[in-house]
Amino acid sequence: RERQRRRREAAGGSTEPAAEEATDVEAVSAAEVLAGVEESGPNYALPTAREGQRERRERLRVDETAKQAGHTIVETGTHVEILGEQGLWWPATIAGREEDVDGRLVHEVEYDGYQGEQYWHMLDDEQWRRATAMPTPADGTNAAASTEGEESGGEEAA
């Protein structure tokens, strides 16, 4: 196209493409575009708010207490797999952690395919492992690994 435009300019002709060169452009209303985004969800992730000094100090205090007690500490955003009652490994992401009422560290877990639903686990009481990258199926179903029966007593924090 650019070559054709340059040739027309050099020949002293119009820079507008001829009718046969024009591309088909479909006019779509903003309402249709927004409806499409609602169906499929946004193609971006909003940045998380910066952790304030007070929150950071509390997180560090909780982590140090857990470390001294020998509890498992897994960083937020880490992809893990947790062994379910059915004998399947369920992929999930650590969404947060905090100190429970009994002083133990609990991790907030969001299972893949179940966005918006958080569960709390004491990883010291669970069989879990760090997950290898697994694509989520396009149909939105759970992408549990088919590693039924594998042994894992959980990982220790470094």
Image (cartoon, grey):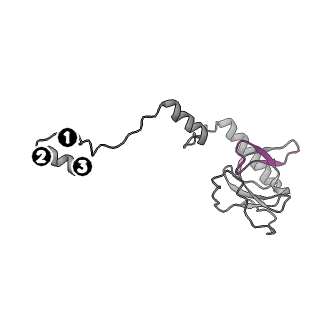
Residue at (22%, 39%) from the top-left corner? 16
- Residue 70: horizontal and vertical position, in percent? 81, 57
Instruction: Tell whether position 93 is magenta.
Output: no
Of residue 148 and residue 157, the one placed in the foreground of this image is: 148
Q: Which residue is disc 2 drawn over?
A: 10
Q: Residues within 10 Å of mark 3 (few under 14, many from 20)?
A: few
Q: Which residues are magenta?
A: 102-120
- Residue 40: horizontal and vertical position, in percent? 59, 42
Q: Residues within 10 Å of mark 1 (few under 14, many from 20)?
A: few
Mark 3 or mark 2, which has the lower sequence index?
A: 3
Q: Which residue is disc 1 drawn over?
A: 15
Give how far apart the Cα atoms at labels 1 and 2 are. 10 Å
Q: Amino acid at mark 2?
A: Ala
Q: Are marks 1 and 2 in contact (CB under 8 Å)?
A: no
Q: Residues within 10 Å of mark 2 (few under 14, many from 20)?
A: few
Of residue 92 and residue 125, the one placed in the foreground of this image is: 92
On screen, residue 70 versus residue 43, left or right, reads: right
Find residue 152 and report its image quarter: bottom right
- Residue 88: horizontal and vertical position, in percent? 79, 61
Residue at (83%, 51%) from the top-left corner? 122
Q: Amino acid at mark 1?
A: Thr
Find residue 102 and report its image quarter: top right
Seen in the picture, residue 125 relative to 52 is either above or below; the reply is below
Give how far apart the Cα atoms at labels 1 and 3 are. 10 Å
Q: Which mark is residue 2?
A: 3
Residue at (24%, 49%) from the top-left corner? 2
